[in-house]
Image: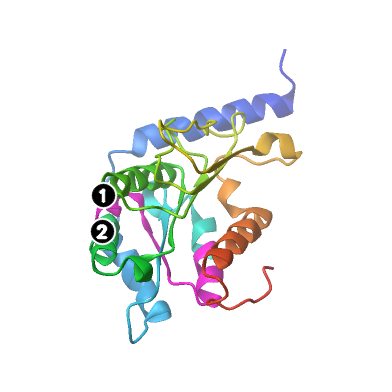
Amino acid sequence: MLKVGARARVWGRAFVVALMVGLAAVTLRPAESLAASDAGVIAVKAQPKGSVYLYLGLLNVFSTGLDSLGSKLRARGVPAVVMNYAGWGGPASEVESRYAKNKARARPIVIVGHSFGADAAIAMAARLGQKKIPVDLVVIFDATQRQPVPANVRHLINYYSPNGGVGKRLSPAKGFRGRLENINVDKLGKDIDHLSIEKQAVFHRRVISEVLRLYGGSAKSASLE
């Protein structure tokens, strides 16, 4: 018989999955509204170098950790844009256009996502792969689907919680030559579930460190706290 704590985790996970499935058809806030809210923060005179997109999950209310991560990145000079997963097609087209005009200026390309946003991150990377565009970094927080990691991805970090969430271990697609890190957060000894995985400060520090490394010092080298 399950202990109270174990039953609570099982019920909690069931609730999250049911909620995600039940609300999936709800009309989402347009992605443009979120991007516009960031515009005043990241506005620059010239098009910034590289592209950094963070995709929220369902209804934009369960992925607040990415709002925080986006703010931390912008505070360090990184042009990070936070938006809903449903709008990933627009950024994909923008990256394709920028890459066609100036490959060096278009990079680094970074995509981060939580839940449905994690699914969108992989989908966007796969679309860019069809155009032979390399994606420097993809960070996944508890994706809801087990998609193969596209061959054009240089580095993918997959934070997943098989017990407290819906995340899964990912496998590389044929031709993948990059670095794939599958990090089972349940083994870290912390009580992390689907609704808290993207809010962890230790994960934020890792992501910020990886992004600043890609920018090669062009972004502010502030404290990662």
Can residue 196 be seen by looking at this rendering? no
- Residue 79 magenta-drawn? yes
Quarter of the image with the C terminus in it: bottom right
Circle 1 packing at 10 Å, graded few (<14), some (14-19), many (20+), is: few
- Horizontal side of residue 180 vs 116, given as left or right: right
Give the colouring mode of the picture: rainbow
Check disc 2 and report the residue beneath it. 96
Is 29 colored magenta in this rendering? no
Q: Work out how far the residue at label 1 is from the one at label 2, CA to CA, in angstroms.
A: 8 Å
Stretch of the chain drawn in magenta: 69-90
Q: Residue at x 43, y 35 (%)?
A: 19
Q: Height in image: 152 above or below 206?
A: above
Q: Quadrant of residue 22?
A: top left
Residue on which disc 1 sits = 131
Say few, some or many: other residues with alpha carbon within 10 Å of mark 2 (under 14 / 14 to 19 / 20 or more). some
Disc 2 residue type (three-letter): Glu
Q: Does residue 201 appear in this view?
A: yes
Q: Residue at x 26, y 49 (%)?
A: 131
Q: Quadrant of the N terminus?
A: top right
Residue in the image at 47% along x and 38% along y: 143
The numbered mark at residue 11 is: none
SS type, badge 2: helix
Mark before the other along the chain sequence, 1 or 2: 2
Task: Locate residue 105, reporting x and y percent.
Answer: 36, 71
Residue at image coords 66%, 24%: 7
Q: Are marks 1 and 2 in contact (CB under 8 Å)?
A: yes
Mark 1 element type: loop
> Residue 109, position in %: x, y?
41, 60
Question: Disc 1 marks which amino acid?
Answer: Lys
- Reply above or below: 214 against 160: below
The extreme bottom residue here reads: 45
